[in-house]
Amino acid sequence: MKMLVAFALGFALIGLAEFQVTAQEAKAKADAVKLDGKYQLVGGKKDGTPIDDEAKKGEFIFAPDKITIKGMGLTFEMGYK
């Protein structure tokens, strides 16, 4: 009987942990959708000095699964979960 209770409790804990991970993933996806869109840099610093106007011409595109950075003739794509 104790063994059966221990197994049931173990499976319940595994189920709760899986539910927690699923809830966190859902929240992360919802947060990613909030960022969805195109952005332009308005300021920043590199090595402690303000960036120049050429660096501000870049475009940052956020999608639910990746970030694309375009500027100065280059394109970088990064995926995330």
Image: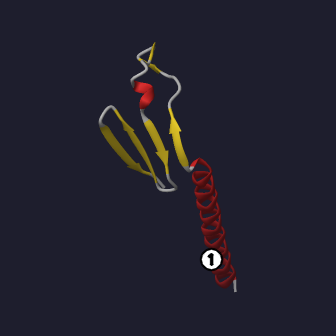
- Amino acid at pointer 1: Phe
Instruction: Say whether residue 63 is left or right of residue 6.
Output: left
Q: Which residue is at the front of the view, 47 or 63?
A: 63
Query: Which residue extends farthest left?
Result: 73
Q: Residue at x 45, y 14 (%)?
A: 48
How is the model colour-coded? secondary structure
* In the rendered image, the vertical position of residue 29 relative to residue 43, given as above or below: below
Q: Which residue is at the front of the view, 49 or 52?
A: 52
Counting the numbered discs, the total is: 1
Q: Residue at x 62, y 77 (%)?
A: 11
- In which quarter of the view is residue 4 placed? bottom right
Indicate the secondary structure of the residue bearing disc 1.
helix
Q: Position of residue 20 (x, y in %)?
A: 64, 63
Q: Position of residue 37 (x, y in %)?
A: 54, 48
Q: Which residue is at the front of the view, 74 or 6?
A: 74
Q: Position of residue 75 (x, y in %)?
A: 33, 42
Image quadrant holding the N terminus, namely bottom right
Which residue has dot 1 on it? Answer: 11
Q: Residue at x 65, y 63 (%)?
A: 23
Q: Position of residue 17 (x, y in %)?
A: 62, 66
* In the rendered image, the vertical position of residue 2 relative to residue 38, given as above or below: below
Instruction: Say whether residue 37 is left or right of residue 2.
Output: left
Instruction: Say whether residue 67 is left or right of residue 3.
Output: left
Q: Which residue is at the front of the view, 74 or 48?
A: 74
Query: Which residue extends farthest top?
Result: 49
Q: Residue at x 56, y 50 (%)?
A: 36
* Label 1: how many Cα within 10 Å (few below 14, some 14–19, many 20+): few
